[in-house]
Image: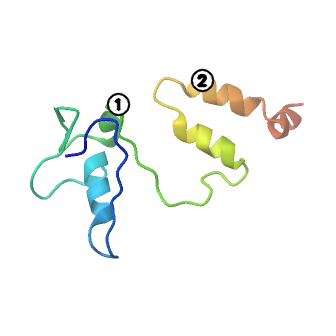
Amino acid sequence: MVPRAQIVGLVGPNGSGKTTVVNAISGFVGAQGGSVTVGGHHVTGRRPDQIARLGVSRTFQAGRVFENLTVEENLTIGKVRMGTTGELLASVRHRPSVKARQA
């Protein structure tokens, strides 16, 4: 159990199941046994978007998700939650390179 508002690390050698644990918690793979509970909500078998609404998110190992965006812009995209995509689109439209293409 991880206490609320705590930052923890998951450490182990290659092949020990770290990624599998994170994938099971975030809903990217189904648990083969046991269950996952987040904030008192049983999430085993739920889709990743449903689990994300409970505050659980996961990142993937990618140096740049969008190569034409800055690091800050890539991080901003990572922070966007359901229902705020309009804000994201507005911020992307105001980029100088996008404005130049629209002219």
The residue lying at 17 percent from left, 44 percent from top is 44
Q: Which residue is mark 1?
A: 53
Residue 56: x %, y % from top left: 35, 40
Left or right: 57, with 67 as reference point:
left
Residue 3 position by quadrant: top left
The relative height of residue 58 versus residue 80 in the rendered view (above or below) is: below
The residue lying at 23 percent from left, 40 percent from top is 46
Q: Residue furthest bottom?
A: 14
The residue lying at 48 percent from left, 30 percent from top is 81
Report the label total: 2
Q: Name the residue type under label 1.
A: Arg
Camera-side residue of 62 and 5: 5
Q: Which residue is mark 2?
A: 86
Q: Nearer the viewer, mark 1 or mark 2?
A: 1
The span from disc 1 to disc 2 (Cα, nearest Å) is 18 Å
Q: Name the residue type under label 2.
A: Gly
Of pointers 1 and 2, the one earlier in the residue sequence:
1
Left or right: 93, with 44 as reference point:
right
Residue 99: x %, y % from top left: 84, 32
The residue lying at 28 percent from left, 41 percent from top is 47
The relative height of residue 94 versus residue 97 in the rendered view (above or below) is: above
As helix, strand or loop, the secondary structure at mark 1 comes to loop
